[in-house]
Amino acid sequence: MTAKELREKFIAFFVEKNHKEIPSASLIPENDPSVLFTAAGMHPLVPYLLGEPHPLGKRLCSVQKCLRTDDIENVGDGFHHTFFEMLGNWSLGDYWKEEMIPLSFEFLTKALGIPVEKLSVTCFSGDNDAPRDEETALLWERAGIPKERIYFLGKKDNWWRPAGKTGPCGPDSEMFFDTGKEKCGKDCQPGCFCGKFIEIWNDVFMQYEKTAEGKYEPLKQKNIDTGMGVERTTAVISGFADDDYLTELFLPVIKKIEEISGKNYAMQENLPAGRQVKKAMRIIADHLRAATFVIADGISSSNTEQGYVLRRLIRRAIRFGKTLGIEKPFTFLISEAVIETLGDIYPEIVKNKNKIIEELRAEEERFTRTLERGLKEFNSLSEKKKEITGKDAFFLYETYGFPWELTLEMADEKGRRIDEKEFQKAFKEHQEKSREGSEKKFAGGLADHSEMVTKYHTATHLLHSALRIVLGDTVHQVGSNITAERLRFDFTAPKKLIPEEIKKVEDLVNEQIKKDLPVTIDIMNLAEAKKKGALAFFEQKYAEQVKVYTVSDFSKEVCGGPHVERTGILGSFKIIKEESCGAGKRRIYAMLS
């Protein structure tokens, strides 16, 4: 089965079950400072999981593009990825377990044709926060899964956690495909990483909200949230359980890497420092596929947030390209293969092809210069010191992005040995610091919907309209980030705003606040919304029915919300900073008081 067939079967199945298809949201979360990227299909739906009505109703399904970098160091095996596609269906306070479990069983066995004897499932074993999920186990048994293939696992395996410290969560039930391999031991069961059991789907029973105090309180509504990875499931059903990269999603990209490097993916040949051809090609294919989509969604390489992740992905791909002997610029060629493979599903990568190629070329040039500086530093260390320590190797890695493999290879050429344990210790300390930084980044919880955040959502609409009045209607939003302390608003503009323009924008916003105007909401299709003058600049994210928020005759904009009922409660609006955030783009920080 191809990925195209899998996507089509999934959406058709749930549309037939009265679900509405919603389009994939951007990889860059809108107005959510708690996560860098959309990492699951449920992320764009958090307001609706918390109880806000969705314009398309209570039953939804989608194919959502996702990006996760938690285990970027594991990419290179047959199934870990940074960018991936997630199939999902949702019940927003509608049906519950007794309907979802039979639906899951029907889709797997009938729509996909997986033999029942190939399936096993896991359920939550229970703890102090929630009881053992006997109900789900019984429903699986009734559906057709034998009792001996129903397992109970703890929170680590069978509990969906919020992305931050707070948010919707709950027990889940995972579905596994038996590859037919022998068990690795008597304790081998679903959840074991030996390769016998491959997880292909997950039903989350989202019935709790984790509070800032760590308590689990019942949500206003019980939700179903499921996730099936396109890459993994396609590989398993197509007989490539050990290697996602042999499916049509990756194979054209792998072929392009073979063509450029002159090496064969199937080769067992070891590269310098013990690296393998296959692993290097997988990393290049995965990372440049991810980079292609991140750039298409408006991100450029930088040293902060999403831009830093993008830079890391590109440079890691280049490093592994060098282990394959690739010396000429190549990243844009791999990206072209990605666009050719997935452009019909995601037209934004076709639309932004030139931008993607330019960004990759520029970053490859920058990194080449960085590597040259690293090489000079290595030679300098070699001349000054009799021994190159593990700490020296890590300094080269951290400061210049100089690959450990290249340091090891060049040290070997000079007859020097490097203490790898010392390098790995420094590297792990660096990872721990990065992890702690990420935890602080996510501390606010996913999609905060506090009173202040709701106010800032409304303020961004007033700011958007004010900017268009002062600077002209060529201005449009290209991003935003809202916390309970401030708003950040990114927009198109050819040059820096002068103080007089900033003052005019502030005055216009405050004028609307003083008028205490009503904020109204209407649900309509996108064409009708545009006809009525609503601003809508993120068209790839909109479903057939959208919410339109109107503030008198001053602002009309398509948005998911939430917003205040009247502008008067916003208080006073003040722009605290205005700066560049890329070519032809400006950024404003503002506060309410």
Image: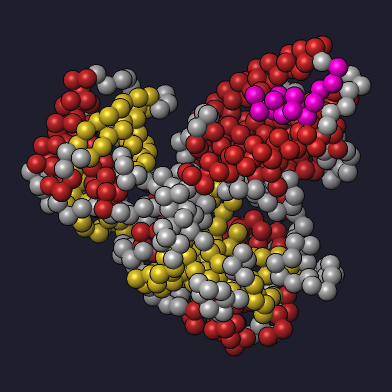
The relative height of residue 124 versus residue 363 in the rendered view (above or below) is below
Q: Nearer the viewer, residue 193 or 436?
A: 436
Q: Nearer the viewer, residue 485 or 407?
A: 485
The residue that appears at 24% across and 18% down in the rendered structure is 498
Which stretch did the figure color magenta?
386-399
Does the magenta segment cover residue 289? Answer: no
The residue that appears at 31% across and 65% down in the rendered structure is 53
- 381 on left or right of 569: right
Q: Position of residue 185 (x, y in %)?
A: 84, 70
The relative height of residue 62 versus residue 392 in the rendered view (above or below) is below
Q: Nearer the viewer, residue 27 or 5?
A: 27
Does the magenta segment cover residue 392? Answer: yes
Total numbered badges shown on the rendered structure: 0
Q: Position of residue 57 (x, y in %)?
A: 34, 67
The residue that appears at 70% across and 80% down in the rendered structure is 149
The relative height of residue 547 versus residue 299 in the rendered view (above or below) is below
The relative height of residue 315 versus residue 542 in the rendered view (above or below) is above
Q: Is residue 113 visible?
A: no
The residue that appears at 44% across and 66% down in the rendered structure is 215
Main SS, magenta residues? helix
- 78 on left or right of 184: left
